[in-house]
Image (cartoon, grey):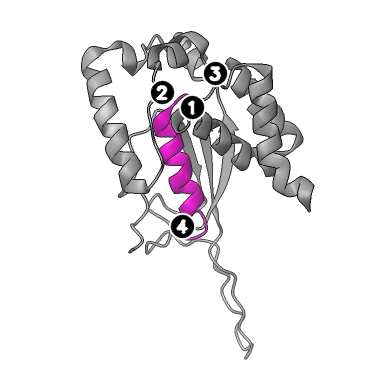
Amino acid sequence: QPQAPFGQTWPRAVFLARLRSGGGGGPPGQAGNRGGVAAPAQGNARCCSMGPVPRTLELFYDVLSPYSWLGFEVLCRYKNIWNISLQLRPSFIAGIMKDSGNQPPALLPRKAQYLINDVRLLGQHVQVPMQFPKDFFSVILEKGSLSAMRFLTAVSMEHPEMLEKVSRELWMRVWSRDEDITEPQSILAVSILALSPTLSQ
């Protein structure tokens, strides 16, 4: 499958991303945006140069957002090809919406109808096993993700090397297996499953 340039298959995301670079604003690898190459010293027969400096991209996400999961998987999949340093930033989406005065798309009939079809098609496109929870409104609007996002924040502070695996497992529980992410035993199950390969070594 051909690699798409940065941004061409980008899903419409609920998450916030901030891209910082010393080079230009174009996609990685594009002419004029490969800063950081050292000029060879004059008169030196053995010219050495550094590769392009990775761009730092921060992904602010909540596991209740299906668009965040899609963006997360795309970035994790192509971060080496796109030469980016991906920084995961767990964020509580309900707090963001409250402070910004926005309503969840699921509460707006036209957006809700669009969201269902859009997420399903995007999931197929990027090969993410997306399945809406049966009791969608209870999972998204009543139970929420506060416990899960607090847990991810703790993981990011204490064991950042595990953040990708733990985040993915929480997304899988909500958006693929229709499992709980609010109860303490659910968080414990996520921890055990995410850490089991490490513990077995």
Q: Name the amino acid type tagged 3.
A: Ser
Disc 1 versus disc 4: distance between alpha carbons? Answer: 29 Å
Q: Is residue 126 above or below residue 44?
A: above
For residue 82, the mark is 4
For residue 133, the mark is 2
Cβ–Cβ below 8 Å for labels 1 and 4? no
Cβ–Cβ below 8 Å for labels 2 and 3? no
Q: Give the range drawn in magenta.
A: 62-81
Cβ–Cβ below 8 Å for labels 1 and 2? yes
**Residue at x 48%, y 41% (from the top left corner):** 72
**1 vs 4, front mark:** 1
Q: Name the amino acid type tagged 2.
A: Pro
Q: Does the magenta run of residues contain 20?
A: no
Q: In this view, does 4 lie above or below 110?
A: below
Q: Say what secondary structure mark 4 lies in.
A: loop
Q: Is residue 166 visible?
A: yes
